[in-house]
Image (cartoon, grey):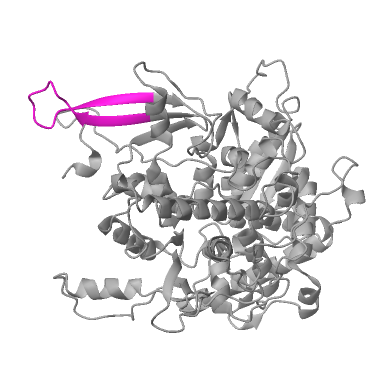
Amino acid sequence: SLKLNQPLQKIGKFPNRKMIFTISPASLADLYRHLYLKIYHGTSVENDEVQNSITRESLLRKVAAFLHSEFGAAMVIDGVVSQRISLMEAASEFCYRFKNQLQMKSDDDNKNNQSNTMTSIALSSTETRFIDKMASVNSSVKGDEVMEVVTLRHPPGRIIDGDEKCNYTATEAGQTPSDLSSLLNSKENLSLPMLASSCPGFVCLVEKTAPAVVPLLSSSKSPMAVAGTLLKAGLWDRDSPDEVFHVAIMPCHDKKLEAGRADFAWERQALMSYGGVFNQTNNINSSSGMLAKGQSDYVNEVDLVLTTGELLEVLSDAASRSKSKNHVGGDISMAESNNNKSSALSAFAIRDFLETLTTEPDDNLDDRDSNLVTETFDENDTRPNDEPQSSTGNLDDSGVHGSGSYADYIFRYAAWNLFGCELPLNEPLPWKSSTTAASSANAAKTSGVLRRRKRRQETTDMREVSLYKLSDGSYSCDAGNENSIPVLTFATAYGFKNVQLVLQNLSKNNVGMSESPERRRFDYVEIMACPSGCPNGGGQIGSAGQRETPRETKERVKETVSAVPIIRPKSNNRSIAFKIYGNSEDVSGSNGIISGGCFGHDARRLFHTRFHAVPKMEISSGAAAGVAVSDTNW
């Protein structure tokens, strides 16, 4: 189609670069559902014999073979690999915040400390421009303000106290190193509740409308960005960043905005410097330093993002061409896909087309790229999704795993790391509907707004789970009796309605670092802008243009979630994470490629990022020049 011409042409512009694809678990799951689990108005279009022989991994290999034949892909990375690293970093960050929160609780200087985040704009992963507007002392005009701008060069990623290798350079004079470091290493960044930051739609909303909430965002990079770091920093195959063209297949259009964030763009010199941490200085951009013609000063971690729907369109076009070539007059046009019958035939055609592709490495690849698909699972990872049913047998529980399992994974890790409570890996957590939405609905009744009639029952997909300290000193997710004390409370909030609810509650309460656990409603919230999370993302195949009832949408999302892998902590892994951190998720990682383990110095440089309170858009001319657009009345 015309809308795909530009990105596909971008791939063709770099014939000499190594094409590497990362496919999100949610994207692969939705494709699996569409091709093998999909049902059209009660008429199954699936072939039981084919379905029983097709697993998630086998579909991944078929898609990888297609990407190799169509675009020359040298490697296809299962997003589970980078997702595990993102989860491990986020879990370690949460435990760090939780422990520091307890230490700061007794500090009198921190009492009633409200968040006062300075607005800033990222220029690259190592350069940020801070903007501070303050009342003018010399002006007699009320409301007159002066603007102070400081452009700061700094180490990439997350900066905390004790980082000895941090150097700060400002373009403006008069700033001391302590002043500069405080801009990046505010104690507000240790505040709770910690909020998931893997959803670019939610992050964009927070940065533009809720500056006080920005310090609560987890600094852990999303799985897509982690995959880009692995590839462009030379951690995977020690390729130069100029040799790699990274394409990410994602369930969300907003991921294209995330790929364009300046925080995920490395200056070449910085990439060389931090490549030295991994003894790869000679492998990363080891040329004479001169830029080739047309070469940028910056290296993006992700060069191109395709949605699941766009991948399906490319597959459909390839299947159509193949059928036209083999059967004259048998072309299946995507223009007919609005019809149920042609949509079903299209799914059949794609499945038949994928069956014709060879997935044997020796037939498709040369010796250098003999492994087209990365290993997707650790040896002891939970595998609930090779078949349509969840391993837990509880589809309602599996709903918390479709968007990366952040809340589930971090809750289990924190229970073990902070309280020594090892929750059974083969049992689901007792997630329950959150009561926050109900209290909000009751508040609306007394707000003076008259409602004539409730059209629909108030519903929410917010869920929560708590860890309690029992009277005998042990810990459990079961409260037991009224003497039990909640020590951890996590929640999931999917959909814009729930996102607004969480932000409203945070804005009403003190979100500063002095907030006590007794006042805090949640310790961690996994937030996704799309209803039902990433499996129902805007870039997914979804209903393929067909109208759905709410019940049908719910069933479709359940089918997609059933094909998403569940990652649990403390597995005896042999994955890429094992090679990077050295031994397992629970050690310092002394034998790995990077030192310091999860949330260590090197990991914070590469696998963490920064977020910004974005300056308000202002009117630039006329009598209202300098006034924020949001503050004007038209």
Depth check: give the residue in front, 8 or 606.
606
Q: Is residue 418 above or below residue 244?
A: below
Residue segment shown in magenta: 130-150
Left or right of 105 in this view: 222: right
Depth check: give the residue in front, 37 or 346.
37
Residue 614, position as x, y percentages in the image:
36, 39
Depth check: give the residue in front, 130 or 181.
181
Q: Residue furthest front?
A: 472
Based on the picture, tell me whether residue 140 belongs to the magenta stretch. yes
Based on the picture, tell me whether residue 369 belongs to the magenta stretch. no
Residue 319, position as x, y percentages in the image:
74, 58
Residue 223, position as x, y percentages in the image:
60, 51
Residue 132, position as x, y percentages in the image:
29, 31
Q: Which residue is at 87% across, 48% downward?
A: 364
Occupied quadrant, residue 327: bottom right
Q: Is residue 505 above or below residue 267?
A: below
